Amino acid sequence: MSVPASSDLEELWRRLLEAVGRASPFARTYLMEAHPVSFAKNLFIIGFDPEFEDHIGLVDNARNHTLLQNEIE
């Protein structure tokens, strides 16, 4: 997937969610409650609102990091 300009963070997030959903519907379910924060210097940061902070532990793992990284490249 080619990475859109950083000004188009929402488009990148939408495309990532679609790609993640094809590879792991479970991960996508929890990432739907997240939002993109920034993408700079090959570091993509996502955030969760306080009411969804329990989802962080479910998606913050090596498998999902690799999944997202592969989709960004």
Image (cartoon, rainbow, N blue to C red):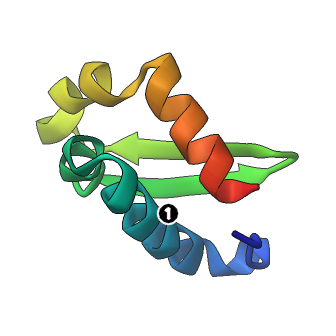
Q: Determine whether, in the image, residue 58 is placed left or right of residue 18.
A: left
Please tell me in which quadrant of the rendered image residue 20 appears: bottom left
| Depicted 59 relative to depicted 11: above or below | above
Q: Determine whether the residue tagged by mark 1 lies in a helix, strand or loop.
A: helix
Instruction: From the top left corner, tell me how far across and down residue 28 is, in percent.
Output: 28, 52
| Depicted 36 relative to depicted 64: above or below | below
Please tell me in which quadrant of the rendered image residue 11 appears: bottom right
Instruction: From the top left corner, tell me how far across and down residue 37 is, in percent.
Output: 54, 53
Frontmost residue, 11 versus 63? 63
User: In which quadrant of the rendered image does the C terminus lie?
Assistant: bottom right
| Residue positioned most to the front | 23
Instruction: From the top left corner, tell me how far across and down residue 57 is, in percent.
Output: 28, 19
Judging by the rendered image, the residue that carries numbered circle 1 is: 16
| Residue at 35 percent of width and 61 percent of height | 22
| Residue positioned most to the right | 41
Frontmost residue, 61 versus 51? 61
| Residue at 52 percent of width and 19 percent of height | 62
Q: Estimate how packed mark 1 is, as few (under 14), some (14 to 19) or many (20 or more) residues with alpha carbons within 10 Å.
A: many
Q: Determine whether, in the image, residue 53 is placed left or right of residue 72.
A: left
| Residue at 55 percent of width and 45 percent of height | 68
Instruction: From the top left corner, tell me how far across and down residue 47 is, in percent.
Output: 41, 43
Q: Determine whether, in the image, residue 52 is placed left or right of residue 12.
A: left
Say which amino acid is labelled 1. Answer: Leu
Frontmost residue, 67 versus 57? 67
Please tell me in which quadrant of the rendered image residue 9 appears: bottom right
| Residue at 79 percent of width and 78 percent of height | 5
User: In which quadrant of the rendered image does the N terminus lie?
Assistant: bottom right
Frontmost residue, 73 versus 4? 73
